[in-house]
Image (cartoon, rainbow, N blue to C red):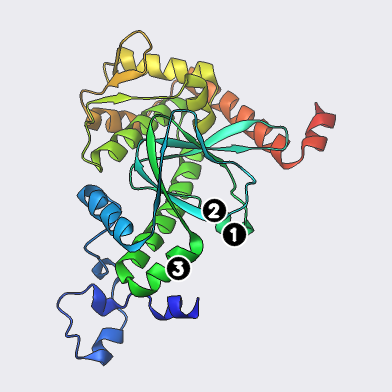
Amino acid sequence: MSGLMANLPSESSFAGNVDHRDRTAARRPVPFQVLRPSVTLQGPNVNSALSLIARCLPIQRRLMRQGDLVFGQGDSFGQIFVVNSGNLKLLSRDTDGRERITKFRFKGDWIGLDGLFSSHYGCDAVCMDTCEIWSFTYAQLVYACEFNETLMDILLRAMSHDLSAANDQMMMLCTLPTKARVAQFLCYWVEALRSRQLRTDQITLRLSREEMGSHLGMTLESVSRSLCLLERRHLIHFMGKGRREICIPNVSELVKFIHAKDDDEAEVDERASDAANLADSMCARINPGIHSSIS
C-alpha cells in the first residue's frame, strides 16, 4: 500500500504546460480544475477508460441475465466489478427485510467498492437486463494502480462520484416535492444515457412504479400520479402497453418543471404524507423494537 500512495498522480502528470524538468514547480499546489486526465469514466471517454482497465487488469468477464445477482448484501468482499454493458440496481435491506433501491449502475460504472470498509458488500447488485460484468481482485487493482497513474485517477473519481451522488440523493429527498423527484429521476436517467452517447429522446425504465418509489422515497400511488401529471403537461409520452417506454420530447422543459414554484395545497399535503412515510420507514430501520412498541 505504501507503494500505491507513493505513486499517486502528481500535478505535473496532467498539466500539459508544466516543465517536467522543473521538479520544484511541479510540486506546487495547483487548482483542482487543472487535474484533467485524458481518460475518465464520464462523457465520450467511457470506452477509452474501459479499454484501459482491460489492458491493465486481468479481468474476468461474466455475461449475466436480467435478475441475476452479481453479489449479495453481506457477502465477503474480495472482488471489484465494472459494468461493461447493461444496467444494474443496487438494493439494501433493513433488519425487517424491507428492500430499498439505493443506486443504479450503467456502462463504465464501478460496483463493490463499498465492501472495502467492512470487508462485506453492503447491498445486492442485481442485473436489470443482459449485462457483461468485469471483475478483478482488490489486490490486483492496487498493484495495477502502482504502475498506472491514470487508472488510479479513474478509481478515485469513481469513488468521489459515489460520494457526490449520495449527497445529491439526500438533497433531492429533503428539498424536492414528489412530482419534481420523478422528473429529476427521468433527467438523471437521460443524462446517464447521454454521457454514454446513447439515445435520450426515448428511454426504457426496466423497473416497476413501486421500485421507482422505493428509490425516491415515495409511495407507488405518488409515483403514478406524478407520471400522469408529466404526461398531461406533455413533458413525457408513454409508448407501448407496459408504459415503460417513455418519450421525452424536450429535456430542458422537464428541467424547468423541476425548478418551477408550486403552492398547490394538495401537493404540500402529499409531500408531507410521503415525508411521514419515509421517516416512519427510517425509524423502523434504526430501531425496529421501539418502532413496534409505538405502533
As rendered, which of 196 and 282 lies closer to the eye?
196
How far apart are the two marked residues, 3 and 1, measured between alpha carbons?
15 Å
Q: Is residue 270 left or right of residue 293?
A: left
Three-letter code, disc 3: Val
Q: Are marks 2 and 3 in contact (CB under 8 Å)?
A: no
Q: Position of residue 62 (x, y in %)?
A: 42, 42
Dots 2 and 1: beta carbons under 8 Å? Answer: yes
Residue 39 sits above or below residue 184 on the image: below
Q: Is residue 170 left or right of residue 133?
A: right
CA–CA distance between discs 2 and 3?
16 Å
**Quarter placement of the C terminus:** top right
Please name the amino acid that badge 2 sits on. Answer: Asp
Q: Quick one: SS at disc 1? A: helix
Q: Which residue is mark 3?
A: 142
Query: How many residues crowd around disc 2 within 10 Å: few (fewer than 14), some, or many (20 or more)?
Result: some
**Viewer-nearest of labels 3 and 1?**
3
Q: Is residue 260 visible?
A: no
Residue in the image at 32% along x and 12% along y: 232
Would you name the residue on which mark 2 appears?
114
Residue type at mark 1: give it: Phe
Mark sitting on residue 117: 1
Helix, strand or loop at mark 2: loop
Looking at the image, is mark 2 or mark 3 nearer the viewer? 3
Of callouts 3 and 1, the N-terminal one: 1
Looking at the picture, does residue 168 appear above or below residue 193? below
Earlier-in-chain disc, 2 versus 3 = 2
